[in-house]
Amino acid sequence: MKLLYALFTGLVFGVGIAVSGMMDPAKVLNFFDVAGSWDPSLAFVMGGALLVTFIGYRIVWRRDAPLFEGRFQVPTSTVLDGKLIGGSALFGIGWGIAGFCPGAAIPALGTGRWEVALFLVSVAGGFVLRRILSDLMNAQVAQ
């Protein structure tokens, strides 16, 4: 049941991304082009998502536990460190350059565009590179 719910959630997300046009990197890039062909539709998509999330969290937090888990898994750290700020900046820069965020690129794989696959391979490569660099830095600290 847990996997079916995850599949359903992913399908709803993918349909929302497709209907809103956010699988088109030009639409996203035009949002950032405030001095040129600015397209405010991304702001409406984000606003709608925030509204749904706000309402959803108010409903979900009334429960003692999620439907398919024993407890809620919520981050407890409130520290704004270099990893968090750097990762956020890197995410934003990558989104602004490519016009894709990883969440929208996954359903965009269905378009068959090679750029989408290249983007996701690059994201995966970044994850691997970060793991390698982190392991190297931890090994140096341990010495």
Image (spheres, rainbow, N blue to C red):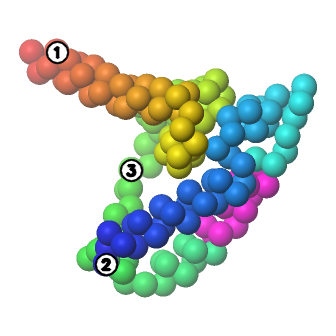
**Image point 32% across, 73% down: which residue?**
2
Residue at 76%, 38% (x, y): give it.
27
Helix, strand or loop for the magenta stretch, by majority: helix
Residue at 27% x, 20% y: name it. Answer: 133
In x, y percent, where is residue 67? 36, 80
Q: How far apart are marks 1 and 2 (CA)?
A: 44 Å
Mark 2 neighbour density, 10 Å: few (under 14) some (14–19) many (20 or more): few
Numbered disc in front, either 2 or 3: 2
The residue tagged 2 is 1
Q: How far apart are marks 2 and 3 (CA)?
A: 31 Å
Q: Disc number at residue 140?
A: 1
In the rendered structure, which amino acid carries the disc numbered 3? Ser
Is 126 a magenta residue? no
- The part of the chain drawn in magenta is 43-54
Where in the figure is residue 98, as x and y percent of width and height?
A: 61, 27
Front residue (pair 112, 60):
112
The numbered disc on residue 77 is 3
Mark 1: which amino acid?
Gln
